[in-house]
Amino acid sequence: MRLSLLFSSLLLLICTWHLQAQIHAPDLRADGRPFDFYNREPYRSDLPRPSDFFGYDTGDFLTTFALYESLLREYQNHSDRLRVFTIGKTPEHRAQYLLAISSPGNLDHLDEIKEQLGSLTDPRKLKAGPGLDQLIQKLPIVVWLSYSIHGSESAAFEAGIQVLYQLLASNDPALCEALEHTVVLINPCQNPDGHERFATWYNAHGSGRPEEYAYEHHEPWSITGRLNHNFFDLNRDLISLSQPESKAATKAFLEWHPQVLADHHGQTKEYFFPPPAVPINPNLPEKTTIKWLEIFGKSNASAFDRYAWPYFVRQMFDLFYPGYWDSWSSLHGATGMTYETDGGGPLGYRWRRPDGTLLTLRDGIAKHVTASLATVTAAAANREARLRDYRDFFESTFKELKRKFYLVPGKDPQSTAALVSLLMMQGIEVSRTNGDVQLLKASDYFGNAPGEKTIPAGSFVVDTAQPYGRMATALLETETPEDSDFLKRQETLRKANEAKGTAEAKQDYEFYDVTAWSLPLAMGVEAYFTDEPIRTEVSGVSAASQNLVSGLAKNNGSKDPEASHIEPGVAYAFEPSSMEAMRMAIQLLRQGYRLDTSNDPFRAGNKDMPRGTFILWAERNPSNLPETLTNLSNKNGVPVQSIHSSFPDSNRRGIGSETDFFLKAPKVAILAGDPVEQTSYGLLRFLLEQKCGLEVIPVSLENLTRDVLDKINVLILPDGQASQYKKTLEENQIGDLRDWVANGGVLICIGGASEFAADPDTKLTPSRIVGSDEKSDAPSEKQPVEARQKSDHASSEKKESANHKPIEIPGSIVKAKVNRDHFLTIGYDSETLPLFVQGDVFFKPSETGGNALTFAGERLRLSGFFWEGNTEQLLRDSSALIDEPLESGNVILFSFQPGFRMIWTSTIRLLLNAIVYGPSQPQKSDD
Ligand SMILES: [Zn+2]
């Protein structure tokens, strides 16, 4: 769930803590009516109950992953209903398991079952007819149950243990009958590293105190078990599949073809199960999707009603963003569902509700176990009908989807290769065109009218008439439209909010997550789409021909990269035109090689070189330089030019110019701990360290002394609440930062940290945010007449203030103009760059510094939600990326998160430019 919601409910509970009765000794059994987990008798005696094996009852202690594994081994050795598959390894070297549970008869034929279920997904291979009907009549249904993707949602993990035991040990005839027709797949812990961090911490400090202020309800920043080792939210990662946990689990999912998936969480005040809130992703077949969500929802409902448990449906959790497990699995043909339980997690063993009643971890577990088992029963009962609709999902895809997406390698073939690779990991078929394709009506991603276009041979094409065509569309379309009633309701909420007094509480909007993610825009890939047939021969790009993709990356400039040996020259140069080139520069700097660059284009080796080109002089580097460059060039797929003379062949500037400058090796620190937002920190470290090979030192505020600052030349302040930055950083620390920048430091601020740096009180930059200084702003000239005339309920003064301040947007794609004279945009050749914009903080263009990216021109919005009469108007002419020089240093303000969720890979190089070129900019006095 959204953390803000959690915190507001915590806040509500703070206000009511005084109502709580005093409890002197934690007696977990004394709370309410205990739920009997062992009520599916008879049980097999050869499998130990979890409580007997662990030595504590369910919900009395958090089971560590290591202990869980020992129970699993015990079951594996003694159960004939279980197969254990190790599907991957986490960053902290824990195993990722997938457990298959079914009748012994089914377990003997798992490979056959997998293969036959796979054939249902492809009408090209298995046509409608008696063969198909027979298959549907006999095949078991596959139900995927996953637990604890957010490692701190402890009830989910414990519930997974109980569900496993029940399925393996209960000889209840109904359950045994269900397993004859069902294969249950359990992903017992989707985030073992996060779980173990949380469980170890909570076990050490949890004493069952129900008071909100007890330490056990306040997980420290460094624990944040919700996130995986890399501090990524795995339930947002299924678009980019950037984390090993996501890669392994989705790969297994694509092999098993489940028809039902329930993903067990635990952060709501009451239990949630589907049907979900609107909007649902319109690429899903609406009627059937909702029909099955209702069937499974009602099955849970009747199980819950038996215990008189409250629950809610059709609110908060939608099925729109394709990067959650429920929507991702739905777009792959399953009935994908999120289950949220109430107990456990940050609420610990026990929690006092506002009405004085107690909520226990055991309660939260009991509800999840009940929902899991009701799901298995409902799946078994509806096996044939669900399998038939599963098949229809794919048949309708082939019938209804006509769209083709073309991906053109163009100038940055590595980004295109990365997108093709990602699509294939999603199970999507990609082909490569053998000849040029003439399109009559091709649409681009920038809202231009469709027109003729020649797609060059060697481009990639995704024909959506394929099994996972719906997922392909969801990822590649420019925009995913939202339900119109839903949008109208948000406008109504806005009007109601604008009519409220300034101190009055506003209603939350119902957007659950971002509203745009189009991959060609996010990854910087030239792409077109059309419904015309493909008028050329194509060859499939299969997983086996992955080399084709990496080959493409390497063929950027040289035909046979393995054989290409870089000849000795007076100097060597390579262009900063890709992530790989930047990574190579970082590798060279780390190894102590001396690199020069220039902020201007130049001529060398009979070739025009763009600004930012990296130059290595033979004379100033070790003699093994040609060998090192040969190795790195082949490894990274980056062509290196050998230059034999500094004398340019034309009337242009050559190398060796006085304006070239030496690049200092970046020494980078990143702020860790409060007030930093954990996922921004995790993302920045992941992309810099693991994707770009940069060494980054995390430093907490208390250790960020003057001495430490003197040892680094780049400091990154990740996203975080500006008010928290202001509250947490002491005045003298801000002064130290200012001095350090003035002496040549590069302070890189992201999102909320930029807002903090634009606060006049910090005196860090002259930059200001839009709406920060309303009185001096020109009257609402930017507002359309319509907006100015409306003043129904609100006073005109209030309306004016509302129109001057951006209203928070959930996350959209906006066209930015690239300032190609600024070092921060080195390597970006086009005039425009699509950016991901979220929130309500926009930056006025800097008058003192450089505006590297601005939102300029008409039609800024490319995809996603904008508030009418507000977002576009206030965003126009604002700045997305500012460089504020401060004496010898720079404060760099990113209004957005570069690399957001590893989906927005096209913006990572902006950050690398700040790090690689920033500390050496010629303005520095100490060169
Ligand atoms: Zn969760």
Image: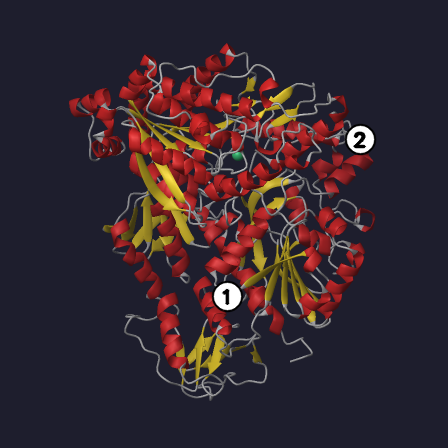
Return the residue at label 1.
Answer: 827
Q: Quadrant of residue 547?
A: bottom left
Number of labelled discs?
2
**In terms of depth relative to the viewer, which is nearer, 689 or 576?**
689
- Residue 449 vertical position relative to residue 593 in the rendered view, above or below: above
Return the residue at label 2.
Answer: 501
Disc 2 beta carbon < 8 A from ligand 1?
Answer: no
Do residues under tags 2 and 1 come within 8 Å of each other at their CB atoms? Answer: no
Residue 189: x %, y % from top left: 44, 37
Q: In which quadrant will I find the C terminus?
A: bottom right
Q: In which quadrant will I find the N terminus?
A: top right
Q: In which quarter of the image is residue 554?
A: bottom left
The residues tagged by marks 2 and 1 sit, at their Cα atoms, a distance apart of 48 Å
Callout 2 secondary element: loop
Colour scheme shown = secondary structure
Residue 873: x %, y % from top left: 67, 45
Residue 173: x %, y % from top left: 31, 13
Q: Which residue is drawn at 80% across and 57% down?
A: 731
Callout 1 secondary element: loop
Disc 1 beta carbon < 8 A from ligand 1?
Answer: no
- The kind of residue on which mark 2 rests is Gly
The reply to whether residue 83 is in sight is yes
**Residue 178 appears left or right of 750:** left
